[in-house]
Structures are given as structure tokens and as C-alpha cells.
Amino acid sequence: MTKTLYQVPIVDPIEFFLMVRLTHNLLTLAFIAAALSCGNEQPITPVASGLGPRQGGQVVVAISSDLSTFNEYQWAPEAAEFEVLDLLFPSLMIEQPDFALRPPSFGERLATSWEFSPDNRQLTFHLRSGARWSDGVPVTAEDVAFTFSVQKDPQLGAIGLEFKEFITGVEVLDPLTVRFTFSHVYPYQLMDANDGHIIPAHVWGAVPRAEWRTTDFSQLLVTCGPYRLAAHTRGQTIILARDPAWWGHPRPYLDHLVFRVIPDVASQVNQLLSGHVDVVRVVPPRDADRVRANAELELIEFPSRDWGYLGWNNARPPFDDRRVRRAMSLAINRKAAVDSVFMGHARVAQGPILSSMWAFNRNLPILGHDPEAARTLLAEAGWGDSNGDGVLDRGGKKLEFDILYPATNAIRRDLAQLISADLARVGVRARPLPVEAATFLARQERGEFTAMLAAWTEATRIELSSVWASRSAGQGSYNFISYSNPEVDRLIAGARLEADHARAKLLLDRIQELIVLDQPVTFLYERNELVGLSRRIRGANINAAGLFFNVQDWYWEP
Amino acid sequence: MGRWLLRRLAAAALIVWLVATATFFAAALAPGDITLRLADTRVSPSIREQWRRTFDLDQPLLTRYLRWMAGAARGDLSTSWTTYRPVATMIAEALPNTVLLAGAGLLLELLGGVAIALHQARRPFGTGDRILTFATLLAFAMPTFWVALLLVEVFAFRLPLFPPSHMRSPAGEMAVGWQRMADLAYHSVLPVLAIGITGVGAIARYLRGSLLDERAQGYVLAARGRGCSPRRALRVHALPNALLPLITILGLSLPFLVSGSLVIEVVFSWPGMGQLVYSAALARDLPTLLGGTVVVAVAVVAGNLLADLAYALADPRIRLGDAA
């Protein structure tokens, strides 16, 4: 999955199911108390005998919604859709899940080798010979150049556009050689060149760009991947069949991948438990124990790239005062709240870089739960209970505010209530305020809040400027909390251009220290990814790089 | 009759137009639009403006409304903002699925309701009647989604007799001919039962009451006096008259055939109109939402109109028109 690369605030993705669940909740819980019958009906046709991988069979994967498009540059597909598109379209390279140790490295995919020019401004890819589109036409450098022209087209405004910002041109040297030119040298040149799937120039190039957005690309589907589309019933089922023309032949081992649209996540889990589906991508924390208890199933848990925070409006009193923000973080029992809401499937976030990343500062000072220290800080900032009503005040103004969150998000609702109770104990009146999701986004963007519960999905690149650098006028920024620290700005700008990651790490460590000291937000949680799958599927290496990272190696236990 | 029909048709068109207009403005004035999806991504403001131009969102509300109305009048329901396909095509795909499911469900509740009511009316206030009264009241009172979940739990998970969701199995998707049909029928059992069970109570309760009323009427007593068996008197004489009010119920059920049951379609992953309109509303896909609403509005007025017409045909005491 190459498209984990942008930062996305989670509003709907933290689970459409939570909303459906508001209604189904109690009943489903009551129903599923007892063990459910299991019976996998996957037809398996062993080809080879003996131990080791076998050809054949199908894996059924539950998805929450159908693919909205087969052309990712048409609009903004959701992350789950990219996992399907990743099976149908090639990327130049495949990002490796080694970001815990260093900036991610890349493995070969459509490109079999690549090299930088001596000045590092040019990057040349050598493409695989023998890669063919599903209509038999070879995949060439022309397709790469065409894809780049689509990614850069301002008329289309594809969402990956900003990753191509520093790529000034893509040049076809010969049918299997293509050269990217960059405006300057920076740490993520490979990542930016790789972002987005390569699309067929000879078919999609014929669609005028003006009609691009209203074209039904399923009618023009030409693919190149381990699988090709075998059947698609809208809103129901996508069936992918092994593509015998793929370069990895005879792999993949599995004949078919079947995607079943099941909008309700509780139903997805029930069908996993009953053997009707083999893989559920997002197992809700509350169902984790049931999946784990089932002898037929395996629960794979690894750190996700999502983290949540309680954002303070740094431009507005009382949170323009660092002491007050720090006091809030000290007053909230973050560990208890996160453990209770995620049932142990998340950890407390400590700073602006995910703790699973190579750049995370392991020596960050940890802000524990210390209501006494919080009271002292608040008193220093001039907040005291002058009239004895239990709520702190200063100059006749009470310390009270709303905690804004999207109404459909049950996780944030629970967090808001726990936080509100913690803050009440130090004399702060924080009222949970659910608002409609669109309103939430609009108010977040316009800074119309005092406190809000929000979340981000982080890229595997370290990109701190859009969220933590001071907001400059007219520029698209995600610093909704109006955080501003000139020292942090300077360090971020320096780290962005530092190609040597050991030297960059020193700058990033300092940035994390400063941000944690400032507490522009109260860092809350880093969620874990929970994937449920049948134990009889062998060879699967499911990790943060994607569900189908090594799908070609999956096979059914003999 | 002709003038009456014309007037009703004009009123129907007016209602559909009003519904479409109200939906358009309500949806357009709600906070946020489709480009909110772009708020999630780091695109520059100029690109967001580009998107808004593509979807005409930079135009004044009235212009957008007039454009949409002009298209709709020609049968062009515009293009979906989430799937980039013609809304009319999407509706054409979803509608048969809903008609199939809701139609079979309606048929089941109708036949079941008539059978239960006939049985009850033979010996009213006996033990059987009391048990059935309790059962039908219970069925009537149970929420549809609960019945649906219960059926799935019992007949798909505990006793794996039926599939828990979808219209077809993966194998069925690839099959042709009667195998494909059989697969579909097999997958329809639980959702149709869920609709039928919750609907059967209402019909049975209604019909039992009107059967008992009719049974006490002179014409039924006269039939009995002429030596007609109680069974025949009930079925041949009382039933046709007792069924008249059901015309209204059926007329009111026609929109259901088109709008579908959102709950059933979500629980059973059934790709019908309910799901289509619901997901369009969530995604702020205005053209799809509007298209779906208009089609449902047409079904509502058509259902009422047909019910009135059917009444006039079935019951000679009712005359439509100015003289009535």
C-alpha cells in the first residue's frame, strides 16, 4: 500500500461501524455470547503434493464499502480502496515495513533497479521487461511518464499532487528506462517518486482530462498485477482472479481473492467467527478477545499509524498559556482512559512522532497523571476557586469550555466523558460537545473551538511542518490548534532538508522535546491495528505496509 | 373520472417537484459539501476550487437548482459524486434488488396474514385465536432489525442453514442460468423472512378485525342460512369484502417496494435503494441522494393513486370524480 503517505484527520474512518453500532450494540453483544459454529467452505484444489505452499483456493476478505473508482487519480479513494487497487496496478517499488529502524527502504516491483545521479538530483528507474497490461500491451516508461502527467495535472487535482511538488520532470530514456528530475535534494525523493500506482497510458490517455472526473473507468479497466478483475457486482462482491500473465508467475498461489462488502463491522466479525469470511481488516477492540479465543482464527496486532489527541486552541485564552495546557495533560489520567476505551489495544501517545517510528525520541520526558502538580500549575497561572463553587476562576471568569468531537465517533465520545470527569477533579469544567462531522471539520479548520478531540493518520515519512509549524497566511496548513514556536519552526525547516537521517534525528529529537514541553495538545493514544484471519491461511506477512504486502505468498494449509 | 385523474396526476407531479426541491435545498444548505472529503487531504486551496467548479459548486444555489431540474425533467439525474457514474444507472441497478426483496417480503406477509386471519376468524376467542393474537402482536411489535439479527444468529450462525448476507455467494456470482437463480433464492430466504415476519402481524391483526365485522353482516348470515358451510361463508363471502381495506395497505406499501428497508439491506448487505440513498446521504453525494429521493417520491404518489383507483374498481360504492 503506497498511499499511507499523506496525513488524514480521521473523522469517518474511525469507524462507520460505531454509528451503526449505536443501534445494534446491545443486541449483538447479547447474541454473540456463545461459541459459534465454524465451517470453512473454501474449495481447495491442491495441485502440488507434499509440504510447502500449494496452488489454489480463494480467500474471502470483508470490506466495509465497495470500490468507488478503479482510477485513484479521479478523486480521493479511501485507504481501504488502495489495498484493492494495489493488487491491480503496479507501483515502481514497494515500500518496506522497516520504518522502525530508518526511513523506509524500497523493494523492487515494476522497477527492478534504480540509481541516483552523482548530484542526487536525478533518479533513474529500470523497468521490468515482460510486464504486460491485461490486454497484452507491454508496460513501459511511457506509462510512467503518463502517470506523472496525470499526477501533476492541476485540472485533475489528484490528492497525491503535493508528493510530486519537487519532481520537475519525468523523462522517457527508452521503453524500459525512465528518469525523474528533482528541484532539490531531500530525504524522501524515492518515496515521492514511488507514490501512486502506474496507470495504462494507451487506454486512459485517450480520455480527455476535462471528462476525466465523470468517466466510469470500470468500463476501461486494464490492469497489471498479481490479480485481475474476474467479476464485480456493485455494492456486493469483487472477485479477483490470479493473473497468469503476471511477472511473478507461478505465484500468487491463491486462485481467487473475494472481497465481500459488509457495511456493518459487527457483522464482519460474526462472519469471520462463523467462517463465512477469512479476513477482517479492522477488528474492533471490543471483539478482539472473541477472535483470539477462536481456535480457527488468528488475531494479528501491530501499531497502526493513527493517533489521537485533545487539541487546545493555542491562540485563545486560557490555552494560550503553556502552564494551563500542561496542567490539563497532568490532570487527565491518560493511561486509564486509553486502556478503557481501546481495551488495551492502544498505548498512550507521548509526542508528535509515533513511537513505532525510527525518529521517535525514546528519552522524552513523560508527563504522568499528577492532579496535584496540575493544581499547582493552574494556581501559578492565576486560577483559583474564589467563590468555593468547585470550579476554578480568574478575574470573574470560570475555567470552563466545550470539548468538541464528531457526534458519530463513539471512541471520542467515551474519551471526552472520561477526560471531562478527570478535569472536574481539579476544578475544570469541560463539557463534551458532539457536533455533526461536517461541522466538526469546518470548525476545526477555522479554529472555532477551545478544545477538540481529533486524530491523524501519519505517513511513514516524518512530516512535521503541516501540523506543527506556525500557520502562515494563505497556505494550506493543518496546524488547526494555532501552535507557534519559532524555535520549532526553525528546527522543522532544517530537518526537512537533512538527507542524512542520523543528523536529522538530532534535530527531530529536539523538536519532540520542545513540543512535549509546550503541550500544544494533550497526546492521547496510538491505536493498534487488529486484523483477524483464518489460521489455515499460511505465508501471510501482514504488517503496517499493508494487508496484501506479500499476497503472492499466501496459501491454504494443506 | 378523466378530470379526476388529470387533477390527481397534476397534484402528484406537484408533490414530486416539492419533495425534490425541498431535498435539494435541505441537502445543499446542510453544513459541508462533497469537497469536505478534500479537507482530509493536503491539497492546496486552488485545487479545492477546481473540484468545486467540476461539480458546479461555485455556481449560485439557484443556478445549480435550475440546472438540476432541467436535467431531471429530461430524465438525466446527473452524475454521482462518489462513483462518477450516472445516477440513473445506479438506481437502475439498485431498484430491481429492492423490488425483488421487498416484493417477496410483501407477498409473504400478505399470504401469511390472510392465512392467519382466516384461521383466527373461524373460532374467534378460542385458545388458538388467543395464541395467534399474542403471536401476531408480538411479531408486529418486534423491530425489524432485531428480527433480522435474530434470524441471522439462529439460522446462519448457530444452525448454518442459510447464508448470513449478500445476494449471491462468490460461486453464485460466477455461475449462470438456473444455478445463479437458485443461489439468489437461497440467499433471499432470511431477508424475506425478516420482512415477512414483521409485516405479517399487522396484516393478520387488521384482517382478523375486518373478517369478524363482515362475518356479522347480513349477507354472510344469509349465506349461512342458505346452507353454506362456515368455512365457505368466511372464504368466499366475507373475505373479499374484508380484503378491501388491504388495498390501502398495499398502496402504502408500494413506496416500500422502491425505497426498500434500510435496516434489512444493511444487515444483509443487500445492494438496494435503501443502502444507495443512505450511503449517498452520509457521503454528501447530492445527485444520488436527490435521484433516490425523487424515485421514492414518485413511488409514494403512484402508490396512493393506484390505491384510490383500485378502490374504485373493487368497490362499486365508490365513484371517483366531481359527481361523487
Image: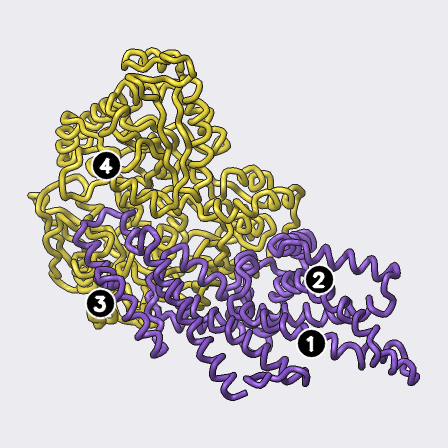
Element assignment for label 2: helix
Q: CA distance from mark 2 to mark 3?
A: 60 Å
Residue holding disc 4:
A479
Residue holding disc 1:
B244
The subunit carrying tag 1 is B
Residue B277 in percent (x, y) is at: 44, 62
Residue at the front extreme, as displayed:
B323
| Residue at image location 88% in from the left, 59% down from the top | B127
Q: Amino acid at mark 4?
A: Asn
Residue holding disc 3:
A201
Asked if residue B244 is positioned above or below residue A449 in the image, the reply reads below
Q: Amino acid at mark 2?
A: Gly
Q: Amino acid at mark 1?
A: Leu
Asked if residue A128 is positioned above or below residue A359 in the image, the reply reads below
What colour is chain A? yellow
Q: CA distance from mark 3 to mark 1?
A: 64 Å
Mark 2, Cα crowd under 10 Å, few <14 / some 14-19 / many 20+, is many
The subunit carrying tag 4 is A
Q: Mark 4 and 3 residues: CB-CB less than 8 Å, in contact?
A: no
Front-lying residue, A229 or A23: A23
Q: Mark 2 and 1 residues: CB-CB less than 8 Å, in contact?
A: no
Is there one chain holding both mark 3 and mark 1? no
Residue holding disc 2:
B201
| Residue at image location 13% in from the left, 53% down from the top | A180
Q: Mark 3 and 1 residues: CB-CB less than 8 Å, in contact?
A: no
Q: Which mark is residue A322?
A: none
Q: Amino acid at mark 3?
A: Ala
Element assignment for label 4: loop
| Residue at image location 32% in from the left, 66% down from the top | B84
What colour is chain B? purple
